[in-house]
Image (tube, coloured by chain):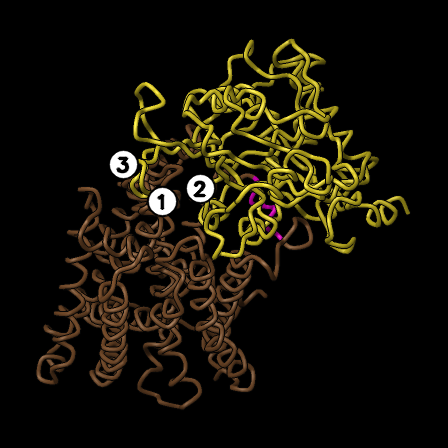
Amino acid sequence: MENSKNQAHSCGGQCSCGSKKDGVNQVFEKKSDRRGMLKQLGLGFFTAAAAVNSSCSVTSGEDSKAKADMNWEEYFKGNYKLMSKEERLETIGRLERLYEVNNGTKINVSSKDAHQDVLYGYAFNISKCQGYMDCINACVQENNQDRSSEMQYIRIHEHQNGQMNFENADDNFFHEVPASGHFYMGTQCYHCENPPCVEVCPVEATWKEKDGIVVIDYDWCIGCRYCMAACPYDGRRFNWNEPQVPEQEVNKDQHYLGNRLRKKGVMEKCTFCVQRSRSGKNPACVEACPTGARIFGNLLDPESEIRWVLENKKVFRLKEDLGTEPKFWYFMD
Amino acid sequence: MKIFLHLIKDGLGAALIGGKRYHFWMGALTLLMLFGAFCYSVQLQEGLAVTGMSDRVSWGLYISNFTFLVGVAAAAVMLVLPTYVLKDTDFSRAVLIGEGLAVAALVMCLAFVVVDLGGPARAWHLIPVIGTFNWPNSMLAWDVLVLNGYLFINITIPMYILYTRYRGKTPDKRIYIPGVLISVFWAVGIHMVTAFLYAGLPARPFWNNALLGPRFLASAFAAGPALIILVLEVIRKYTEYSIADTTIRKISMVVTVAAQINLIMLFSELFKEFYFPTHHSSSAVYLYFGLDGKNALTPWVYTALVLNIVGTGILTLNSLRKNFKWLSLACILLFIGIWIDKGMGLIIPGFIPGPWGKVVEYAPSWVEIGVTLGVWAMGCFVFTVLVKAAIPIETGKMRYKGS
């Protein structure tokens, strides 16, 4: 009874997939007799895998028992896209508790949905960018990116005047900026309206939200990296090792689909700082840019700055021939 | 059921018996597998950072081998079809070997996909119904389906045939012919689907071409049967299982035609890339000439080119093809040539240059090579056990004795 009810609402209004698709959340939903269900399903293998998974670093006592239980439930939870509201709150509760048990400090993980009548877009002013890279630093700190591998969502390409050929541009420069005779262009995830990365994911671990943000469920991703091969814009990053962020540097204001801490072997990327943008703030890169080259806003709001740019500037997008419809425009003053 | 258990027992018993060479072979494979398992444990512990892959080149040796082996698996069909459907009895003794090879190749394919995953513990998300399976949108979801389906078909058909023979009966055609027909289409399917996995990515112009699927098939039907010829030569030399010269001759015709078509397609690709090179030819330029002074793959691809041309040349000359020594040589050349061409030579340049033109090269790490060797050893091990068990049943030496 309860199961069928949850199935009907399993999408939580998040996606257009309809409610017939199943997730492990539906299968494992009955909390009352989880173990019985497991036996019924004959998932001995998963049981063993999860036991190994949850037994790591278990010592003794009540806390570790609770921790093991939480790890167990985390392992068997379903795809966020298909979770009901309650299930989302449950997993977030577990994640917050686990972080507290492990680190002694509290984090706040949000599950805020997309707002009505909002579609995010981004514009980049080529005339203004000087290549200072404050955006990159702000992004790394805001989004808890792995410090050990120096992961960065944004790349700043230094072009020579007289051409805009990315093959001749340098995205890895270490000299004083702005260098004379050069101009700068930033690239990152473009949050395409027609994203090829979403199409290819074998487990629907990445999808486009109603406000146009392309997100990843870090706990559902299996790390096959097919999305990375499918992205024409180099927008995605992979955790090749266990990501490391010093505890005191962790941004504790998090979103499930945004900057919460990732683990080794999963994809991540720019989310237009979903934890900020859905709270009415600008993404960290926009706020950090000292030249005002970055503009972010609601494409559906005729009064927004981004709409003003699209209507009054000569804008263009990159690799438009691929039909991915990026929501990221470039323009010049 | 009881008889089936006896079959398994007798089969495994047969696999344990062998001469010194045989035990040495199996011992070496076991050692390699253990080494591979050790390397994989390092990778599990440290993450994929211990491989040569990076955000710039995100697929490497694993996916290269996977791609090549799908072709080997698909090639079993070239023996299955004539034997079971066209009643060409010449192939019948080779066909079980071919199917055993398909099973071993598929086991390796699945293993290569698993070792490439960042989160193998979460692989259950791929299981339909329990996980979320992005079918029909994702070609990788298709690939999971068709590969497992093909594995199932290639286990059940030979199992049924061996089981009935074991009981001293003749297999019923009405039961296995439909399965054989399905497997024929399925074999083409697994390879086309695997090609579409790459061809469906406009982000990678090197792969995004309509010829990829057909070329996959042509190269598979050259490399797969070439391997079967080599295996048959070994089997008839070291076991009492006799295989007629005509069988090998017929298979060599398959290899010849497929290798010729493969070469024509290769030249067609080269023409398109180099007659008037565009932005989209950069990967081919990198592969054959190097870009920005970086040319790690160039020696490999020219080796492949030479091997393919020489191998195909030998096969094309009647007098050489009919000489078994030359035939074996040609098969070895082709197998290695296609392994390079369709493995590293296809997968790596897809990522170089990157989407913004950055040229970052890739070279497999020792851990990666160790895991790869381990998976190949596992495939050889599986194949050897299967063949060792199947041969005595086929020759009638092993029969159910009853209780």
Q: Residues within 10 Å of mark 2 (few under 14, many from 20)?
A: many
- Position of residue A206 measured from the top left corner of the image (x, y, whole percent): 60, 44
Residue lying furthest right: A1
The residue at the point 75 percent across, 31 percent down is A112
Nearest to the observer: residue B157 or residue B313: B313
Which residue is the site of mark 1?
A: B354
- Position of residue A82 measured from the top left corner of the image (x, y, whole percent): 73, 44
Q: Is residue B130 visible?
A: yes
Q: CA separation, marks 2 and 1?
A: 8 Å
- Element type at mark 1: loop
In the displayed structure image, the side of residue B351 where residue B333 appears, left or right: left
The residue at the point 30 percent across, 26 percent down is A180
Q: Residues within 10 Å of mark 1 (few under 14, many from 20)?
A: many
**Pair 3/2: label in front:** 2
Q: CA separation, marks 3 and 2?
A: 27 Å
Residue lying furthest bottom: B87
Apparent colour of chain B? brown
Which chain appears yellow?
Answer: A
In the displayed structure image, the side of residue B117 where residue A174 appears, left or right: left
- Position of residue A284 measured from the top left corner of the image (x, y, whole percent): 58, 23
Say if A247 sits above or below B275 in the image.
above
Quarter residue B252 falls in: bottom left
Q: Main secondary structure of the magenta part?
A: helix
Q: Please provide the residue range marked out in magenta.
A: B122-127
Discs 2, 1 touching: Cβ within 8 Å: yes
- Element type at mark 3: helix
Q: Chain of mark 3?
A: B
The residue at the point 30 percent across, 69 percent down is B219
Labels in figure, total: 3
In the displayed structure image, the side of residue A151 where residue B36 appears, left or right: left
Which residue is the site of mark 3?
A: B366
Q: Which circle marks residue A234 in the picture?
A: 2
